[in-house]
Amino acid sequence: MKKYYVIALVAIVAILVLLIGNIKGKYDGYVQEVSKQIDKFLDIAMEEEMGIRQKSIRLNDLEGPIIGIRLHLTTQDVVDSIMNLPQVKDGTYRVDIVDGRKERAEGIPELEITRMHNQDRYIKHQIYIDLPVLDSIFCYWLKADIPHLFTLLDHDTIQIKSYGDVGIKKGNYSKLKRVGLHEKQTLKVQASIPVEDFVRAEVIPLLLSFLLMLLALACVLIQLTVIRRKELELKQREMATGGIIHDLRGPVTTAISIVESLQEGQDDEGMKSIESRNEVMLRHVLHEIETLGDTIREERMQTTIHSKPTDLVALAETVRREVDVVYQSKLHTIIIDNQLPQDLKPMVDADKVERILRNLVENAVKYADAGVEVRVRLAWQNNMPVVSVQDNGWGIAPQYLKKIFKQYYLIDQPSGRHRNGHGMGLTNVQHLVKAHGGKIWVQSHPGQGSTFSFTLS
């Protein structure tokens, strides 16, 4: 269950990150759009403020009459200007020659260069930008309540004067704007674009995003509740099934003991044979009960291995004898191929290895036509026992080989072939092999039989 909580937590964090990222992206776009408007209206305000100064203080009254301004944008412009100066009376008129090549290279328009030159002329006479007037014009065009501060700096970045919201320390808009061509003054503009305007403009999308986030979280919580309830139900079912298995195991074990006692005191060979068969059938029932128990323990990973020296050959012979009895109505042959070193008894859990072998040998007999031959090979490789169960039965198609060890998975058999089993046997076999620290694999081709091999480390 813990992994589901982790997955849910990751999903919640991912949703929050996406939502926050979406809001931040929208807010950044809003700030950029407002910044563009500030740039635009600041240029308009500076132009109109200078126009007001020109009406109140005429430069011609300070410098004398001027017949024009020559703007040099290329080197040839400079040469042409020097060669073609107008002929005027001495000291009566003059021509301002402005070198705007640097500004032109920076992409500044010609009208802006001319305006900057006029600003230089006013700065020369200490007639600086009227910041209150500039602020009034800027606010008129902006039509938004954005806290801002204008600061006029000299060429050493020393403040000359300022106007506006002096409380602004660090806004989300800041720009230095050249006042003249010769960089004698700089206008520093700071603004704090309020988040409230963004929230008001985006209130509906934000609410929808928030509601969607709540809906997603609710779905996750509901799903977790359902999973938790299902897990509790499964746990209760497993406990009940475990109890039933325990209740069944006791009587069957007792019945086996009774049959064994009857065999010891029985002289009639016919009765001995019947009692022996009954014992095998009871052991088969016990094996099915243990298989069901292994399925439950596998889901909780509670299988415990009790290793002891085990005679694998005798174990294989027991399985062969009991399978022969259970499937005596079906013609088959089971061969034990012992390649183990003499008197070798590996340390394994005998009961669980017997269940492994019984399941593989029974499958080999079940999933084959009459006359099947099953070969159980016992070998010793790389200091560990290697067991293989080979048959010449129906075989397994390649697309099923990776799925046969999944719990409750059943292979679709061709028509005319009965599908036995419940999809638990091979899953339990794999689990018991892994509990021994070994591995299991299969080689098979349709119509050529199968070979299941496993190791026990």
Image: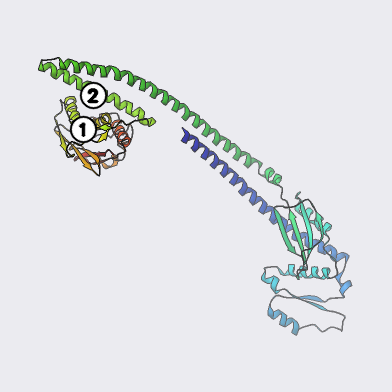
Report the residue at 18% width, 33% height from top. Answer: 313
Look at label 1 and name its amino acid. Asp
> What secondary structure is marked by label 1?
loop
Report which quarter residue 181 is drawn in.
bottom right
Q: Which mark is residue 311?
A: 1
| Badge 1 density bin: few <14, some 14–19, many ≥20, Cα 10 Å | some
Report the residue at 51% width, 36% height from top. Answer: 8
Look at label 2 and name its amino acid. His
Report the residue at 62% width, 45% height from top. Answer: 23
How far is mark 2 from mark 1, CA to CA? 21 Å
Q: Can the viewer see residue 75?
A: yes
Where is residue 209 drawn, in percent x and y?
60, 40
Report which quarter residue 382 is drawn in.
top left
Q: Is residue 410 left or right of residue 62?
A: left
Report which quarter residue 446 is drawn in.
top left
Q: Is residue 226 left or right of residue 134?
A: left
Q: Nearer the viewer, residue 253 or 192?
A: 253
| Badge 2 density bin: few <14, some 14–19, many ≥20, Cα 10 Å | some
Is the C-beta separation of discs 2 and 1 under 8 Å?
Answer: no
* Above or below 128: residue 382: above
Q: Read off the residue under disc 2.
A: 284
Q: Which numbered disc, 2 or 1, marks the residue that appears first in the sequence?
A: 2
Where is residue 249 drawn, in percent x and y?
29, 20
Q: Can the viewer see residue 416?
A: no
